[in-house]
Image: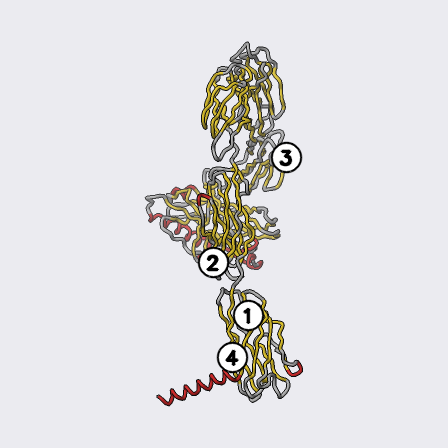
Amino acid sequence: MKEKLFLFTVLLFLFIFQITFAAEVSVVPSELNASRVTFLNFTIKNTDASNISKVTILVPPEFKNVANIGTSVDRSIVNMPSQSNPLIWSNRTAEGLISANATEYFWFSVLTPSVPSRTYFTFSVNLTYVDGSESEFMVEVSVNDIDSPQYFEISFLRPNNTKYSPGMSYGFQIRWKDNVNVSDVMFYSNFNESKSILVPLMIGSKSDGIYVINFTDLSAGVYWFMWHANDTSGNFNETSNITYVIEKADNLIKVFLNGEETNYIKIENGTTINITVIAVGNICLFKEGESIKCEEKRLEWNERLEIGDHRFEVNVSSNNANYSSNATGLNFSIKVIYPRIRFMNLQAPSSATYSPGATYTFKITFLSPAYPLNNISNVSFTFNNQVYYLPVNRQDNETYEFVLRDLPAGNYNWKFCANDTQKEMSCSSGVLYISQAIPRLDILNVQDYLAPVNKTIVGVGCPEQLVCKLYLNHTELPSRYYDLVTDKPGYYIFTFNTSGNANYSAASVTKTMTIYPPKGVTTTTVPPTTTTIQQEKKLSEESVLSAKAGVPTLYKVDNSDLLKVTEVELVTSVDINNIEIKVEIPLPNEIKIFSEKNKVPLAYIKITSNVSAEKIVNIKIRFKVEKARVNINNIDENKVALYKLENDKWLKIPTTKIGDDESNIYYESLLSSFSIFAIVGEVKAGFPWHLALIPVVITIVAIIVYLFWPTPLGNEYERLKQKWSSRGT
């Protein structure tokens, strides 16, 4: 242990000896001012026997903008620094830069850091000798902040010499900048007896920030204030004393005549006038130049005045610190008149619906309470900004009437006025609202019929000033009537409408009618256990049609007694020719027997077409159900619906009852594609469910009869089926 300590001491002695005697390094100046561009001059004295070949100075990173680099060494033998940090001077010759026992200087300019006073930094100076040895020296400098904070932009929220206002806020603002940081800002003033207030930073930073202080409800007077700021190095700065004046406010006088703040009022004879004056100080009221009353802060005076014009004056004297006196005062006047014209028994319509030739009566009675001292001089009625003068036969208690006729729809302002002999006017006014009428359009003789039909369809209810149009199946007809003469079944849509005008609103009425085939000898009977089908009727029907895009195309089913479908209405998205629609009874292997609690299948139908589903907008299927079948199965006629077979499931289609006759009830369903369908009825409560199987048995029997009956019907079905298959879909 002693040997190690001795070795360490020897090495330390040799190190100190080398530093002390190999070279001497110093810098001028060693005390720097913060935030300044300063020239640093390093002195290097070579006390070693070997020449120095390279000098390296490492600048602390806080020092910026190194420039103006130089040396006392002959430029012919030195390579100048090629970078700003570290700075390296190297020799060009073998002799080196600094000979033994010689002194040379190395300098450059630098921007000192913005730091508080007594902040120390170290420059590292490395010396390389010709023999390859090196020495490193640490040169310390201190940086001191000698700059005081600077102020800018002193401003006020309220301008100097502003007038007093109770509760007003007064703001004072200043901007302080410092090369390092402001530590605190003080506000000295005599506001509210305050001597010094520490003001926090409002916006910005400690080196560049805005400081704001506010005071409220300062009295009128002359004030002084001063801003003071310290920085983190102990430097300070302050403004001079600044004078701030708050002047006395004008002593505003408020005059209220019968509760209204005004300097003029007109009252009727016999009315008591109430004069109220509010101000700060002693208030004095004068009438016709003579003082009648004085009071502090609030003055009130009540009296009845004679007819005529009366002149008043009020002024204020004040010792209040915040308000000035008002010696000039304020003038106001009061006029007393005879009672004005009155009105009674006003009759005026306020709202109506347009009606051609209608009359509108406005009626009023005017009277004068002061007759004969004050009389009616003229009467006028203003309607829609047009003035009409009415004759005055009596100057008191007369009734006036004005009648208007055939007014268009709109809003009308009206006003009845009467002037009296003292040139006063009394009026009553209002607004008459006349709204558009709604045409009551109708279409006569539109109902369901059995063919043949000979009827005239007539659109009625169209006012003379309107243009109304009658449409059949969305096609405009040339007249407002249409002679319907046909012996064929069909479905018709009639629309009668108008676009309206200024007096009438638009209106439209649509009605539909179905013409059913005449009653024939063919019947379908439904006894409890058997069924009979008249065989001269076909078991299927097909038709070839053409359709316009968006226009309903109607296919009438002649054999509706057996097939139950009366009409198929098709709307397509494009024009299509040669549309084929086929309605038939499906084969047993094509259907799935409908089975659902409380519901009875009444018929099965198959409808097919060569129109693809994407070209179909909608389909309406109209069908009928015999009242006998509804009654025998105890079915609620309002709960009959069409079901569609889709993916081996029965889906209910929205169905509406559209009418009935002596034998049948008619329904309509809306859908988007063809398929196999079932007509299903829901039984009423309490129905004996063993009877629900009867329609199923009847349907199966009908199908068996159809398939195996030895008549030409089967051959006809096969022929139609082959024809249909050959055309494809």
Q: Position of residue 134 (x, y in %)?
A: 53, 85
| Residue behind mark 1 | 63
Q: Nearer the viewer, residue 327 or 562?
A: 327
- Label 4: which secondary element: strand
**Residue at which label 4 appears:** 137
Q: Name which residue type carries label 4.
A: Phe
- Of the 4 image quadrants, the one containing the N terminus is bottom left
Between 674 and 51, the one nearer to me in the picture: 51
The CA span between labels 2 and 3 is 98 Å
**Residue at disc 1, secondary structure:** loop
- Residue named by callout 2: 183
**Display coloring:** secondary structure
Marking on residue 192: none
Q: Position of residue 677 (x, y in %)?
A: 46, 52
**CA neighbours of label 4 inside 10 A, class few (<14), some (14 to 19), many (20+):** some
Q: Are marks 2 and 1 in contact (CB under 8 Å)?
A: no
